[in-house]
Each structure stands twice: as C-alpha cells, then as structure tokens.
Image (tube, coloured by chain):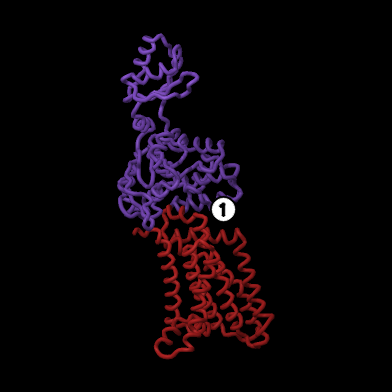
Amino acid sequence: MKKTWIIAKRELSVFFDSLIGYIIIVAFLGFTGFFTWLYGSDIFYVGQASLQTFFSIAYWTLFFFIPAITMRLVAEEKRSGTLDLLFTKPVTDWQIITGKFVSTLMLILISLVLTLPYYFTIWGLGPIDHGVVWSGYLGLVLMSAAYISIGIFASTVTKNQIIAFLLALFIGIFFHIIFKMLAQSMTGQLADIINYLNLSSHYEAISRGVIDTKDLIYFLSIIVLGLGLSELSLAKRNVTN
Amino acid sequence: METMDIVVESLTKQYGSQKAVDQISFTVQTGEILGFLGPNGAGKTTAMKAITGLFSFNKGEIRIGNKSIKNEADEIKKHIGYLPEDNELYTEMPVIDYLKFMAEIQDIPEEKIPERIREVVRLTGLQKEKHKIIGELSKGYQQRLGLAQALIHDPEILILDEPTTGLDPNQIIEIRELIKKIRKEKTVILSSHILAEVEATCDRIVIINNGQIVANGTAGELQDRAQGKFSMKVAIEGGETNDIFNKLKSLDQIEMVDFANGENKLFTVQSVDKNSPAKEIFDMCANNNWYITQMIPQETKLEDIFRKLTMN
C-alpha cells in the first residue's frame, strides 16, 4: 500500500510539473462548462434544476480524455527504459500498476471536485435532487476508474503512446457504445449477455440514482480485470520458454 | 546479511529460441570487483539484469548472501544498487525529487532520507547541479545521478552496466575515480567493452562471448593462459641478414622466425615453449661474432586475449 502511494505520488508530481495535469483540468472544465451552460441542449434549454446535462457531457468527455492521460503511463517508461530500473527495486508489478491507477484516478477526482460549483449554482437556481447528483458523480468516478484500468492495460502492451491511446479507445468504444448497439440488434440470451457488458446501461442506472450491487460489481470487475491484465502484461518479461 | 557473495550457477536466459546467456557460472566474493568483458551483444547486460532480479531466467540459480533470487527477490533487491547501461532517468523530474523517490522506494526510513540524499550528492559531486531538472544535466552529471541513485540505500552490492560509455575522456576518469572511491566494502560487478578500464579497476575479469564464459581470472592469469609460447623481437647486427635468419631458424629452442623489419635486421622469434631462447641466441651471436642491439620480450596484451577469445 505504501509503495503504491510512493508510485502514485511521483506520477502526480509529473502531472503537475509537466503541465499535463493543468491542461487536462482546464480542458475538461472548459469543455463540460461550455456544453453545460452555453451551447446545445444546455441547462437553460432543458429548463430543469438537474445536472443531467453535465453528466451526459462528462460521460463522453472523460471517455476521450482518460486514454490521453493513461497512454503515457507505462508506454513512456517502457520506451525510455525507466521501467526496467523500477523492476530492480523492491516494488512489485502490482504496486507499480496500482500506483499509476491511483494517480490518474486522483487527477480525475480533482477535475470532478472542481465541477462542484456547477452543482451549487443549480442548487441556487431551483429544487435539485441531491441524491441523483451524488449518485451521478459516483457513476462518473466508477466509469473513469474502469476506463483508467483499460487505458493502463493498453499502455502496458506497447512502447508507443499513440498506439496505447488508440488501443484504449478501441477497447473502450465497445463498452461505451458498440455493445449497446449489438444488443439492440439481437435477441435472446446472447443479447442479454452483451447488454450486460454495455457500460452505458450500468452508468445510466447509477446516475439515475439507482445504486445496485449488480452495477457496482460490473464496474469493479472491469477495474480488477484491467489492472490484472496490466500486471500480467508486465510479468511477460518473466516468461521462460 | 554478513557476507554478500554472488554465486551464479549455470544461468540460462532465453529470448524466444535465442539463448542470451547459456549455462554461465561464476562467483564474486564479498569486497571483490569483477569486470564483465565481452563484445556488444555477448550477454553481459542480460546476465547483470538477471542478478538484479529484473526478470526471471530459464535455468540455473543465482544466490546472493546465501539467499536465492528466485525465492527472496524483494529482500535481495534491498541490497543491490544498479546502474543500467543507458542510465534511464525520469528526465522531467528535479534531481532532489528523483533521489527522494528512489530512497522511498528502497524502504529508507523517512527520517533518514534527507541525510542519505546529502551523502550521495556529496559523494557523486552533484552539489552544484542538485536544483536542476534531470533533463538539463549534462551526460556526465546524469551518469553521476545514476550512480547516486544506485548508492542511495548504501547497498552492499553494486551492479554497474558500462558506467563510462558515452562520456568524454575527462568524465571517464572522473567516473572511474568515483567507482574506486565507493567500492570499499562493496561487492561490485562492472561491465565494459573497454579493456583498459576493466584492467585498471577490476580484481578479476570474466570474458563472455555468445552467452558463454570464455575466460575467468585475474588480468595476470589471463595473460599467462593466452601466452603459451614465448615470443620476442631481437635485432642482430654484424652479419648477413640471411645468414642470421637461417641460423636463428636452426636453433632448437626456436620454432618460428620472421622479419619484423629487414633493414634493421630485426626479427620476431617464437620459442617452442614458454621459455625464453635468449641464451641460445646469445651463444649463437658469440660464436659468429655478431652482436645483439635489441631484445624485446613481447607481452600478450589483454586486447589480444580478448580478440583471440571472442573472434570466431
């Protein structure tokens, strides 16, 4: 746990020393703010005191932003060789992976905390359902965690950051939209299975305020699977035949 | 841990169908500095990485201070400092932050970290550069930082993979002095393809080629082994060149004669064994009224041994 935090701390300092962190936060706030308040089906157009507009925009924004953050996490260290040095230190592969996971999740949490003024503003504008807001944030956090673990896995399989980015998007798009489309065009048990894999149905359930263990298990499974596969991918160097 | 001997037994590491190192065995005693010599791609780096616990290997065993790296890698890693070949650093980090990170990851107690950082910064001469970002450091200072990182937890074992490559001659000498300074009470493995470096800094030399050990001994032992036959240059004056050549050739002790430089009547002679034919040559000259102007024994250089053992 302590080693995980040491790794996470270093990653966080890289985010903020190299401006990546600030750029991500500013871009995220700018993007979601623009579409929540100013343009398209914004809050005033909808005319309800709810953060639903923000949540559906953040749902897509994070989908594209997270691979951009995670792409360098392992690929960059593989390319420069710093990962090899880390392997010679008393730290396990799991600690390296989870450290990087925690650092990215914290960056996302900071971004989300900075959107709380949206919440307070709308609260001032009309009667807001607080439960739905908090469960909406929970949904965003869970979704982010799932995509971070997928992004880290994509970053462990290559030395090239662009490939890591595209691979993360490619894997992500299945959960984000393709499974949904497939399930709609199918019937029977297969459709049920594919629909279960569809991330947006779980996300929507949670952001409507329905926190079901089924949905929590779904997100936790993706996170654990993504991190587990990342660890396996690092352990590939130990394969001896 | 008391003794920190490194024992490598029939270590084999295979990448696909290619064996990077094949059944190599050697021992490094506590306090010894071992030079790892070989052409590029011989398997030096692979062997060193295996000792640091960077990856597992196919066959064999590595024991450090009687602990197997297979079972107690995490414990062993606390006692090893490693300077990788390309000295990869987090170039975007400040020097002090980097050392702090490395200290934390090596389990140095929080309260001792500032003291350890001061110590390694002083030892490696980084005082003036310590407030810079790593990427701003010159190659020589980056190398010092690599060493500082390897020394931060005061390890008993140091594994230095080509510590002087890419440096200018002044920096090479500085780094070499630094290694001499820190080697006290440490077990060191140092790899290089520069022979003079290994000869100058190491107690013992292991030459590795195509993944196998081709020689293992002190510089002196390797020379003795490679010499076999005594050879020298001798210049004889006072007679016809051809006469001298033929007479030299007819001596029992001499196996081979060649003109080293015809004009000066300088010959290269090789003895049938490792004994010098000096007395026979002297007697021959005395009998013919010739005189010897030069007599230079030829020592086999480490370069020759290296070439002989690694050319195939």
Q: Secondary structure at mark 1?
A: loop
Subunit under mark 1? B
- Amino acid carrying mark 1 in the image: Thr
Q: Residue furthest bottom?
A: A187
- As displayed, is residue A187 above or below residue B31? below
Residue B103 in picture, x, y percent from top left? 48, 50
Residue B78 in picture, x, y percent from top left? 40, 49
Q: Between residues B8 and A130, which one lies in front from this camera angle?
A: B8
- Which image quarter holds the C terminus of chain A? bottom left
- What color does chain B have in the rendering? purple
Q: Residue at x 34, y 15 (%)?
A: B280
- What color does chain A have in the rendering? red
- Residue B283 visible in the snapshot: yes
Residue under pointer 1: B91
**What is the number of callouts on the image?**
1
Q: Between residues A213 and A95, which one lies in front from this camera angle?
A: A95
- As displayed, is residue B66 above or below residue B265? below
Residue A236 in picture, x, y percent from top left? 40, 61
- Which image quarter holds the N terminus of chain A? bottom left
Residue B206 in picture, x, y percent from top left? 37, 39
Q: Residue at x 59, y 47 (%)?
A: B137
Compared across the picture, whether B159 is left or right of B64 comes to: right
- Residue B2 visible in the snapshot: no
- As displayed, is residue B149 above or below residue A110? above
User: In the picture, residue B207 is in which quadrant?
Assistant: top left
Task: Tell me the crowding category of disc 1: few under 14, some 14 to 19, or many 20 or more residues within 10 angstroms, Cα based.
Answer: some
Q: Residue at x 39, y 12 (%)?
A: B285
- As displayed, is residue A165 above or below residue A183? above
